[in-house]
Amino acid sequence: MKTVEELKEIAAQVRRDIIRMVYNAKSGHPGGSLGCTDLVTALYFEVMDIEPANFTREGRGEDMFFLSNGHISPMLYSIMARRGYFPVSELATFRKLGTRLQGHPTPVEKLPGLRIASGSLGQGVSVAIGAAIAKKQNNDPHTVFVLTGDGELEEGQIWEAFMFAGGKQVDNLIAIIDHNKKQIDGSTDDVMPLGSLKAKMEAFNWTVMEMDGNDMQQVVNTLREAKSKLGQGKPVVIVMKSEMGMGVDFMMGTHKWHGTPPNQEQAEAALQQLPTTSLGDF
């Protein structure tokens, strides 16, 4: 069990890792990675029942997480390394040719902790539904989690998946929609207005919850409550308000850092804003 303060310290280190990884690679997606750090930190270090040392791609006997919006891979890689799936030093290989930490996650290189390739948007919810159904068939009581971005909701497949999960009562599944209202081309309101996600998901027979994804205490409480609502004939979705670029003032409030790496001056400025931690940089 981790305290909220301990989780905040881990999240602070993950944000430092993200900036350094993307700067070193001169490529990557810092904005959404920084925004989703608190959520995925809480999942891996507090909420999910997982055993990194005994990882299998099948995921039997443990909770499973799928990252559908795979471009925010630096966040996931940092958290997996800090959780013990692979050496923290390997973060220095991010986006280098021939390494396991590619820009979009891929299991081809057999990276512990990773189950699917993602980054081709719209597919992760479908995979998570399949994993959840497999757990039901195997009498495995564990939970499947999936994270998707709000810009990703422009993909038609994801709505077919939402409709299937609600209609087929896949009630061991928790989806989180990162509703930061920004995507690579601008505001989601300008590119493709989403309307009320709460009303849409309720119409698809999902139990809908909402939370501030950058309030660690609220994140932990909401995730625990979401797990308590499973097994009642409906999947659960959490509409998560987050801030793209969270923790770095010049990256917040804009879509421009969706897929733009910082230069040396910007990286140094970002790291000055992000507190150092007892975990230490890679």
Image (cartoon, helix red, strand yellow):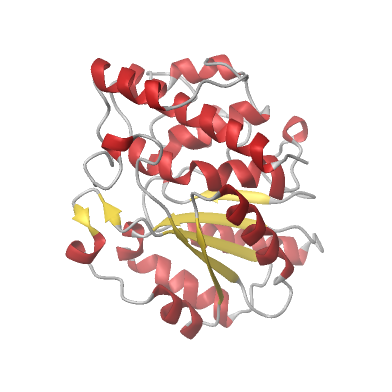
| Residue 116 percent across, percent down from the top left | 53, 44
Give the residue drawn at x 73%, y 68%.
Answer: 228
On screen, residue 200 versus residue 170, left or right, reads left
Foreground residue, 182 or 271? Answer: 271
Count of picture labels = 0
Using the image, determine if residue 22 lies above or below residue 150: above
Quadrant in the picture for the N terminus: top right
Is residue 122 shown left or right of residue 124? left
> x, y percentage for residue 235?
61, 72
- The residue that appears at 70% across and 50% down in the rendered structure is 47
**Measuring 50% from the left and 82% from the top, which residue is drawn there?**
202
Residue 268 falls in image quadrant: top left
Residue 53 place in picture, x, y as percent? 76, 30
**Most foreground residue, 175 or 3:** 3
Can residue 95 be spotted in the picture? no
State which quadrant residue 150 falls in. bottom left
Residue that appears at 66% across and 62% down: 132
Q: Is residue 18 above or below residue 58?
A: above
x and y percent of residue 90 in the render?
Answer: 53, 17
Q: Compared with residue 35, is residue 273 higher up or lower down, i.e. above or below? A: above
- In the picture, measured across the screen, residue 100 lies left or right of residue 143, that is left
Q: Looking at the image, which residue sits at the far bottom?
A: 203
Q: Is residue 143 visible?
A: yes
Given residues 209 and 108, the one toward you in this image is 209
